[in-house]
């Protein structure tokens, strides 16, 4: 499916979602008409794979800011306790050498191998994340994406109705990490929030299941029962037919819609192959309706 506007080509990579975007250099200022094509493709396809981009942090931040305010990561082992707009996903230390598998940053990053939506534990959850490849392994280290929109749409009508008004409690820490001391207690308390289980994209009205590893209880349900339901829904969303696995190439930058997709890192030979990707995260807004219009429109 090609979009006949501007120089940009948008081509679907999966029957249900994900599009490859070529014909634009995102490290330079993006003209308004091209941003319109990208914004529309983002809302339609949920995951955009940009090819042949060579971002540095400054240009990645500048492009990301066109979508809205950027999140600032809290200090944690994965960013060497240095909060900022860029999160580095890597198995390398600052000196460029491999980190040992038991290094706190490596253990922290392993959590990304569970299906999740970025920042769903924040009261204002993330709109989108943009991950840009700097070093990619020759084998493995894919990022998997699941369409929670396609999964929702595949549910029977009565199941959709039963889930419509449920609210989930999201926590920053994972279920089995009550004793996790990678974060301070204030951050743990601040990052326990509620969100609806079904979210609609205000631009097109398309609904999606908003679940994943941070969604841990259902408000008004016994905790174990809510946890079971959320695990079942996450398993439903991440069935093979709703999943696209992205093998990273040099120059790839992938943007995903956290409102309607889940993602996870996959493993690779972390003692043999180097991998380094830089992420920016675009914050959401209190009211999704604020996104009915293109940012800056
Ligand atoms: Fe993530």
Image (tube, rainbow, N blue to C red):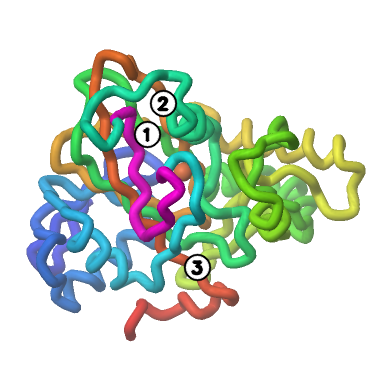
Q: What residue is pinned by disc 2?
A: 266
Q: Residue 212 in the image: x percent, y percent?
A: 61, 41
Residue drawn at x 23%, y 65% is 63
* Magenta stretch, main secondary structure class: loop
Q: Is residue 140 above or below residue 156?
A: above
Q: Relative to residue 39, is residue 251 drawn left or right? A: left
Q: What residue is pinned by disc 1?
A: 143
Which one is earlier in the sequence, the residue at label 1 or at label 3? 1
Residue 248 location, quadrant: top left
Asked if disc 2 and disc 3 are in contact, CB closer than 8 Å, the reply is: no
Judging from the image, what secondary structure is the residue with disc 3 in?
loop
Q: What residue is pinned by disc 3?
A: 284
Q: CA distance from mark 2 to mark 3?
A: 26 Å
Q: Is residue 46 visible?
A: no
The crowd level at tag 1 (other Cα within 10 Å; few <14, some 14-19, many 20+) is some
Labels in figure, total: 3
Q: Residue 239 in the image: x percent, y percent?
A: 54, 29
Q: Which residues are magenta?
A: 79-92
Residue drawn at x 78%, y 38% is 227
Q: Residue 80 in the image: x percent, y percent?
A: 41, 43
């Amino acid at each position: 499916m090609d979009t006949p506007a501007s120089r940009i080509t948008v081509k679907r990579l999966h029957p249900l979602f994900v599009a490859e975007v070529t014909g634009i250099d995102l490290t330079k200022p993006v003209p308004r008409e091209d941003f319109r094509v990208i914004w529309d493709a983002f809302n339609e396809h949920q995951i955009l794979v940009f090819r042949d981009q060579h971002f540095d942090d400054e240009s990645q931040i500048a492009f990301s800011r066109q979508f809205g305010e950027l999140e600032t990561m809290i200090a944690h082992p994965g960013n060497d306790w240095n909060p900022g707009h860029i999160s580095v996903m890597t198995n390398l230390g600052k000196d460029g050498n491999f980190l040992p598998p038991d290094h706190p940053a490596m253990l922290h990053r392993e959590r990304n191998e569970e299906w999740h939506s970025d920042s769903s534990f924040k009261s204002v959850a993330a709109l989108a994340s943009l991950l840009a490849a700097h070093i990619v392994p020759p084998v493995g280290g894919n990022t998997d994406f699941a369409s929670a929109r396609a999964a929702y749409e595949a549910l029977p009508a009565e199941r959709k109705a039963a889930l419509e008004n449920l609210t989930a409690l999201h926590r920053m820490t994972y279920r089995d990490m009550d004793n996790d001391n990678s974060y301070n207690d204030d951050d743990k308390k601040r990052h326990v929030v509620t969100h609806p289980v079904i979210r609609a994209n205000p631009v097109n009205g398309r609904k999606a299941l908003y679940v994943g590893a941070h969604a841990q209880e259902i408000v008004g349900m016994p905790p174990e029962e809510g946890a079971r339901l959320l695990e079942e829904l996450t398993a439903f969303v991440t069935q093979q037919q709703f999943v696209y696995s992205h093998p990273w190439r040099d120059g790839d930058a992938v943007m995903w819609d956290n409102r309607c997709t889940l993602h996870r890192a996959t493993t690779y030979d972390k003692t043999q192959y180097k991998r380094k990707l830089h992420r920016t995260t675009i914050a959401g807004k209190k009211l999704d309706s604020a996104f009915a219009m293109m940012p800056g429109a």
